[in-house]
Image (spheres, helix red, strand yellow):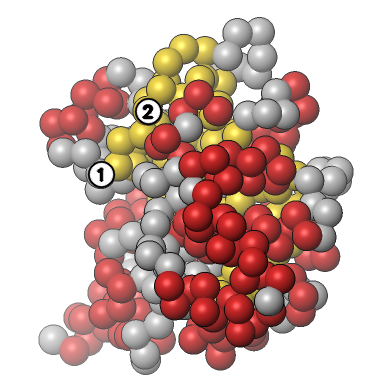
Amino acid sequence: MSTIPNLWNLVLAGGDGTRLRELTARVAGAPIPKQYCRLVGDRSLLEATLDRITPLASREHTMAIVNRNHLPLARPQLARLPLQNVVVQPSNRDTGPGLLLSLLTLARQGVQRVAVFPSDHYVGNETALRRHIRRAGRLLDELPEKLMLIGIRPERAEPGLGYIESRGSVTGRERDAFHVGAFREKPSAADAHAIVQRGGLWNSFIMVFQVGCVLSLLRRQRPEETTSMERALANGEEGLARCYAALQPWNFSSDFLARIPEHMVALRAGRVGWSDWGTRAAIEQTLKTLGRTPPWVDNDRTAA
């Protein structure tokens, strides 16, 4: 299928991945962030993400955000993107500042519509995921003031993930589209089970929306940070460094999206084989499902 008209991809690659540093050190020989690590096969999670989303928007319409100290790892893996499409933040201040900087940069280039993707997730059925992104794009045509969020149909009650709770179907629109009622980040095991029983969805953090609409919401919800970042961009690299030095970390999901549920629609995505690969156990569970043995397990047996 052809790319989606007027859509840009935004890839978030600024995480430090501290929980998996021991594993990435074993695989890569150094404790690198997981998105740059070739954990399984010959592609890193970042490289797999870029390949996965290219059918949606061209490399010329794909932007990635990285941290300055990640550049030696990031540059080779982002070599197929235009140089100006790689946004470099001075340091990691969680997903809030990274997304805000990216959206302001896109807006300065006149970009109107964007699909946002974490760079460190696994997707087994990439065709199915792209189909859901296209669904989100069609629904955005009808509801341009809404933020479309891809929610994953849970395979189990997993307390280590974030959840989306719905408050009713979007009547007469795309099937399996719901108004968002609330976010629940890493609930207890009992609460996770109850949320799943009520039809809650895993939060994939994959989003499709109008850049201008979300920036307007950010100016209302996070006015100081937005104004500071806008001024920093006008003052070049030095201004951005000063801005980041003064920024407190904040999370785009829990510190922004959780405050604006009435502005969001969740689309339920099933059978995409999604995992956030946030822990070694999550990676090994995915590989077990695929009937594959993690290479580091073989190494453990050899060492023993």
Q: Is residue 48 left or right of residue 33?
A: right
Q: Quadrant of residue 62?
A: bottom right
Q: Residues within 10 Å of mark 1 (few under 14, many from 20)?
A: some
Residue 214 at what x, y percent from top left?
Answer: 62, 42
The residue closer to the viewer here, 2 or 14, is 14
Which residue does the image show at 61% across and 84% down from the upper left? Answer: 238
Q: Which quadrant, please, contains the C terminus?
A: bottom left
Residue on which the image places disc 2: 182
The residue closer to the viewer here, 206 or 293, is 206
Three-letter code for the amino acid on which mark 2 is drawn: Ala
Q: Is residue 115 left or right of residue 280?
A: right
Q: Is residue 261 visible?
A: yes
Seen in the picture, residue 107 relative to 256 is either above or below; the reply is: below
Nearer the observer: mark 1 or 2; the answer is: 2
Residue 152 at what x, y percent from top left?
Answer: 45, 36
The residue closer to the viewer here, 28 or 216, is 216
Proximity of marks 1 and 2: CB atoms separated by less than 8 Å: no
Residue 248 at what x, y percent from top left?
Answer: 38, 65
Three-letter code for the amino acid on which mark 1 is drawn: Lys
Residue on which the image places disc 1: 186
Give SS at disc 2. strand
Give SS at disc 1. loop
Which residue does the image show at 27% across and 26% down from the upper left? Answer: 195
Which residue does the image show at 27% across and 69% down from the upper left? Answer: 19
Residue 16 at what x, y percent from top left?
Answer: 39, 73
Give the tally of numbered discs.
2
Q: Is residue 198 left or right of residue 149?
A: left
Q: Which quadrant, please, contains the N terminus?
A: top right
Q: Quadrant of residue 229?
A: bottom right
Q: Residues within 10 Å of mark 2 (few under 14, many from 20)?
A: some
Whole-Å distance between the Cαs marked 1 and 2? 13 Å
